[in-house]
Image (cartoon, rainbow, N blue to C red):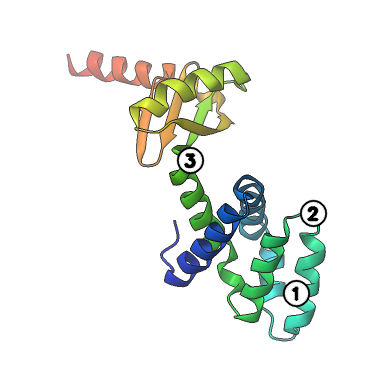
């Protein structure tokens, strides 16, 4: 997560306004998309970081790029551009998502499996593992990893729960070699 004090302050301000206006879910969805766009597009980051492009042109581009987003999200991007902190947009999004999840009792989880999990399977994993980490629910990002052979590996924050067949076979191999 972000270590920027400025990113935390922008995120907190956005969080409080979104909460007060009852727009937390919509803005959080925008922040997920914003984070993805800013992290994956080095061209966009370079373009927005260019001193050759005026602030008003950058704001116009961002307004067009995020035309379907909530007004609060677009306003955040405008403010970050004016403050010459648009490079911290992904960090602001990280902080916002963390705050929104914390207030809702939700944790982010990456679930690695050999095949895509059904909604029912994801819900069952969420119910079981959310209780283990003291949360009400998990927001699951299912990642297909055929190297697991079977079972699942779950990462929630810095905790890893590994019940994959690959890990079990590795442990068995280690035990046989050391016996």
Q: Which residue is mark 2?
A: 68
In the image, residue 67 above or below residue 130: below
**Which quarter of the rendering shows the N terminus?**
bottom left
For the point 77% across and 81% down, the residue is 56
The first of marks 1 and 2 along the sequence is 1
The first of marks 3 and 2 along the sequence is 2
For the point 44% across and 68% down, the residue is 4
Residue 59, label in figure? 1
For the point 62% across and 45% down, the residue is 25
Residue placed furthest toward the left = 179
Circle 2: is it few (<14), some (14-19), or many (20+) Cα within 10 Å? few
Left or right, residue 16 beside residue 68: left
Q: Nearer the viewer, mark 3 or mark 2?
A: 3
Q: What SS does tag 2 mark?
A: loop
Residue 44 lies, in percent from the top left, at 71, 66
Q: What SS does tag 3 mark?
A: helix
For the point 54% across and 57% down, the residue is 15
Q: Nearer the viewer, residue 64 or 38?
A: 64
Q: Which residue is mark 3?
A: 104
Residue 81 lies, in percent from the top left, at 66, 76
In the image, residue 89 above or below residue 103: below
Q: Nearer the viewer, mark 3 or mark 1?
A: 3
Left or right, residue 133 beside residue 146: left
Residue 156 lies, in percent from the top left, at 41, 36
**Which quarter of the rendering shows the C terminus?**
top left
Q: What SS does tag 1 mark?
A: helix
Q: Are marks 3 and 1 in contact (CB under 8 Å)?
A: no
Residue 58 lies, in percent from the top left, at 75, 76
């Amino acid at each position: 997560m972000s270590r920027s004090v400025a990113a935390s302050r922008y995120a907190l301000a956005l969080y409080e306004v979104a909460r007060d206006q009852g727009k937390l879910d919509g803005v959080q969805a925008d922040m997920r998309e914003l984070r993805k766009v800013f992290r994956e597009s080095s061209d966009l980051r370079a373009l927005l970081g260019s001193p050759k492009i005026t602030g008003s042109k950058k704001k116009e581009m961002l307004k067009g790029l995020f035309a379907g987003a909530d007004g609060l999200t677009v306003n955040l991007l405008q403010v970050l551009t004016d403050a010459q902190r648009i490079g911290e947009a992904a960090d602001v999004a990280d902080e916002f998502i963390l705050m929104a999840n914390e207030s809702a009792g939700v944790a982010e989880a990456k679930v690695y499996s050999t095949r895509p999990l059904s909604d029912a399977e994801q819900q069952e994993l969420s119910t079981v593992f959310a209780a283990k980490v003291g949360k009400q629910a998990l927001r699951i990002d299912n990642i297909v990893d055929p190297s697991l052979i079977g079972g699942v590996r779950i990462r929630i924050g810095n905790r890893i729960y590994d019940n994959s067949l690959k890990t079990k076979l590795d442990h068995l191999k280690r035990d046989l070699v050391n016996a």
